[in-house]
Amino acid sequence: MIGAMAHVPLSERVRELFDGTNFATVSSVNLDGSPQASVVWVRTDGDDILFSTVKGRRKHRNLERDPRTSILVVDPSDPYVYAEVRGRVTLTDDPAGDLIQELSHKYHGRPFVEANPDNQRVIVRISPEKVYLRG
């Protein structure tokens, strides 16, 4: 595996896009090398970007095997303004589902109800290695 690149800070505008109630699209690499993309709720934590997923889902398995990722957020008021962050992830168990609850309140103003009570939540932390802002 190629060594990690230097951590890159997020600009204020990139942080605004990821901290707004904008949906982001995160990409991972399938076992066969093909891309996989999912729409997620996000927030920043310093210069890192966080989202929640369920253990065992495709993106979790992909990111566990290959931590490289790209995440893109678009300004809904002007789709020509967007930010892409490329980096590597770290995965942390979130047994109480604290992050998904926080994100549900941010995006919907209400608690999140897990579709399957046996789901085990994971916090995905993206450490930026390349940041691109358009617009």
Image: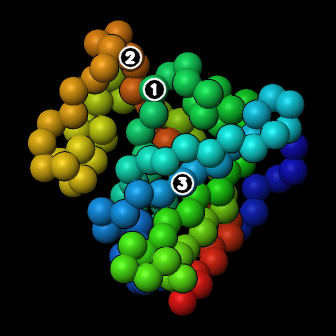
Q: Indicate which disc, 2 or 3, sits on the residue closer to the N terminus.
A: 3
Foreground disc of the pair 2, 3 = 3
Q: Which element is circle 1 on?
A: strand
Q: Residues within 10 Å of mark 3 (few under 14, many from 20)?
A: some
Mark 1 → mark 3, Cα distance in angstroms: 16 Å
Contact, mark 1 vs mark 2 (Cβ under 8 Å): yes
Report which quarter residue 59 is drawn in. top right
Contact, mark 1 vs mark 3 (Cβ under 8 Å): no
Place of residue 60 in the rendered image (x, y in percent of width and height, measured from the top left): 58, 30
Q: Residues within 10 Å of mark 2 (few under 14, many from 20)?
A: some
Q: Residue furthest top?
A: 118
Q: Nearer the viewer, residue 130 or 58?
A: 58
| Residue highlighted by disc 3 | 25
Depicted 28 relative to depicted 132: above or below? above
Q: Residue at 12% of width from left, 42% of height from top?
A: 110
| Residue highlighted by disc 2 | 119
Mark 2 → mark 3, Cα distance in angstroms: 22 Å
Place of residue 108 in the rendered image (x, y in percent of width and height, measured from the top left): 19, 49
Q: Residue at 56% of width from left, 63% of height from top?
A: 72
The type of residue carrying mark 2 is: Asn
| Residue highlighted by disc 1 | 54
The type of residue carrying mark 1 is: Val
Quadrant into which the N terminus falls: top right
The type of residue carrying mark 3 is: Thr
Q: Indicate which disc, 1 or 3, sits on the residue closer to the N terminus.
A: 3
Quadrant into which the C terminus falls: bottom right
Depicted 128 relative to depicted 36: above or below? below
